[in-house]
Image: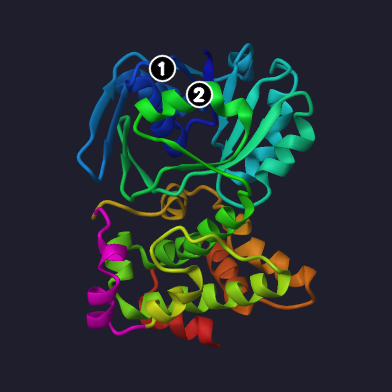
Amino acid sequence: MKIVVYGAGGIGCYVGGRLAASGTAVTFVGRQRMADEVASHGLHLTDYLGADLRVAEVDFETTPDAAAGAELVLVTVKSAATEGAAAELAPVLKPGAVVVSFQNGIRNGELLRSRLTEQVVVPGMVPFNVLNRGAGVFHQGTEGALDVQRDAALAPYVEAFQWAGLPLTQHDDILPVQWAKLLLNLNNPINALSNLPLRDELSQRAYRRCLAAAQAETLGILAAAGIEPAQLLAVPMQRFPTILRLPDFLFRRLASKMLAIDPLARTSMWEDLEAGRPTEIDYLNGEVVRLAESLGRTAPVNAKLVELIRAAETDRRGWSGADLLRELQR
């Protein structure tokens, strides 16, 4: 089988690297900067459970033509680049190729399907965090398998993902899973603005109250839209805001698993701000704002987080939990 990872950044290099480390032939397609890094260092893949894998010889290309003949394409570009990726892939992919969107947000699968009409497009979701530590090192800092829409076209590839240690969890309806992941990803801007590792940020009640406000607002809008998010963790998503607001000593006792995070873990939004790249804020909190507007409602907390991240894209600053909470409560 020929598997191509299209848009090989942090998530793409990690997922594709795990496949390659288990013996599957993978071609990576990405930017020249990443191609040079991988050419110099190979891929070094680690995780919070102690995995330590290396791929010395990496087939890394920089043009869409490398996807020609692919049977399976994993699209891992940032959400803002989805339309461009679809336009690049449409002329080169063979009919019947399977294309899986492993991206943040809600609508990337639909967008790919509207452009890649002769291929099988499967929406998916990566629930875990990957930190790009540089020099070809990619670290999975939080738990989770890979979630995808159930599709018979995935059958030939299930075993390869199993061997790679990244089993595919297939769902009859991926939308509630995507919204549940987005609810968790509402922490991305808070983490990025805090300028702290995830575990340190979530250990502080003020930051958790910021996340609780964003989640509670979103849950109200989802209920109005008739959307019930899936239960990804032991606690139903509807109870998350209450738990997040608990004092630190109670939170540590009742939600210790939420703090069982690798100390290296940070969000991709923090990485984007540090690198001076545009963030995915419009496809996370911005998605909540759009849904609210479609219902004739507002989402002021999420709208403010969108505003603050857009400002941080040009004027980087760190926010204390207390200052950020006051800003969201205005």
Query: Which three-letter amino acid code belongs to the residue tagged 1?
Result: Thr
At numbered mark 2, what does the secondary structure look like: helix, strand or loop? helix
Mostly what secondary structure, the magenta segment?
A: helix
Q: Nearer the viewer, mark 1 or mark 2?
A: 2
Mark 1 and mark 2 lie on one chain; the one further toward the N terminus is: 1
Q: Distance of mark 1 from mark 2, alpha carbons?
A: 10 Å
Is 253 inside the magenta-drawn segment?
yes
Whether residue 18 is visible, yes or no, is: no
How far across and down, in percent of the image, does residue 3 sit?
A: 52, 19
Q: Which residue is mark 1?
A: 24
Asked if the stretch drawn in magenta spans residue 150, the answer is no
Query: Residue 49's image quarter?
Result: top left
Q: Which residues are magenta?
A: 246-262
Residue 125 shown left or right of residue 57 in the figure: right
Question: Residue at the location (59% across, 73% down)?
Answer: 219
Tell me if residue 268 comes above or below residue 229 in the rendering.
above
Residue designated by label 2: 157
- Could you say which quadrant of the image residue 267 lies in? bottom left
Say which quadrant the C terminus sits in: bottom right
28 vs 48, nearest the viewer: 48
Number of marks: 2
| Picture disc at residue 80 | none
Q: Residue 206, how many percent across, how many down?
A: 36, 80
Binning the other alpha carbons within 10 Å of mark 2 as few (below 14), some (14 to 19) or many (20 upward) gives: some
